[in-house]
Image (tube, rainbow, N blue to C red):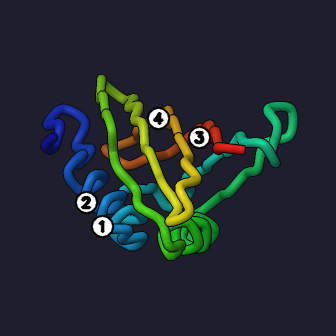
């Protein structure tokens, strides 16, 4: 995975940030006014968790990537002003999480992201 020239979106920074658990590297991929909508077992589709702006995104990424778990970028596809990726995670006790993201890019930065998570229960 490398940088996609026509969008300016850096997939290598995405991979390194996820797999090295580097929240600040990931934050660099977001626009200042970016918005993330998160759907999971606690935030249903009719009422997703919404995180808006770099400060809130920094806090969310800091929480996720500070946890004792592994993260792996499984796939990433970039086309024009959109990208999608799959991230798999595992806690030390074997609990797994799968996260699918669809993102909208503006000037090579993430401006909108929808994340759908599924957890082992």
Residue under label 2: 16
Q: Residue at x 61, y 50 (%)?
A: 35
What element does badge 1 sit on?
loop
Residue under label 3: 115
- Residues marked 2 and 1 touching at CB (< 8 Å): yes
Report the front residue among 48 and 41: 41
Name the image quarter holding the N terminus: top left
Residue 16 as seen in the image, left or right of residue 51: left
* Label located before the other in sequence (3 or 1): 1
Q: Looking at the rendered structure, which numbered label has been put on residue 104?
A: 4
Vertical position of residue 9 compared to residue 24: above or below: above
Q: Residue at x 60, y 62 (%)?
A: 53
In the image, residue 116 lies at what x, y percent? 62, 37
Report the front residue among 103 and 15: 15
* Label located before the other in sequence (4 or 2): 2
In the image, residue 56 lies at what x, y percent? 64, 68
| Residue 80 figure quarter | top left
* Label located before the other in sequence (3 or 2): 2
Q: CA distance from mark 2 to mark 1?
A: 5 Å
Vertical position of residue 55 compared to residue 43: above or below: below
Residue under label 1: 20
Q: Residue furthest top?
A: 79
Q: Residue furthest front?
A: 93
What element does badge 2 sit on?
helix
């Amino acid at each position: 995975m490398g940088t996609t020239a026509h969008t300016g979106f850096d997939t290598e920074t995405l991979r390194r940030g996820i797999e090295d658990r580097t929240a600040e590297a990931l934050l660099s991929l977001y626009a200042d006014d970016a918005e993330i909508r998160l759907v999971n077992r606690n935030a249903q589709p009719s009422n997703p968790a919404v995180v808006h702006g770099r400060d809130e995104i920094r806090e969310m990424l800091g929480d996720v990537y500070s946890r004792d778990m592994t993260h792996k970028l499984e796939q990433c596809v970039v086309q024009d002003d959109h990208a999608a990726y799959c991230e798999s995670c595992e806690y030390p006790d074997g609990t797994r999480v799968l996260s699918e993201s669809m993102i909208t890019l503006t000037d090579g930065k993430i401006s909108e992201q929808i994340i759908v998570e599924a957890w082992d229960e």
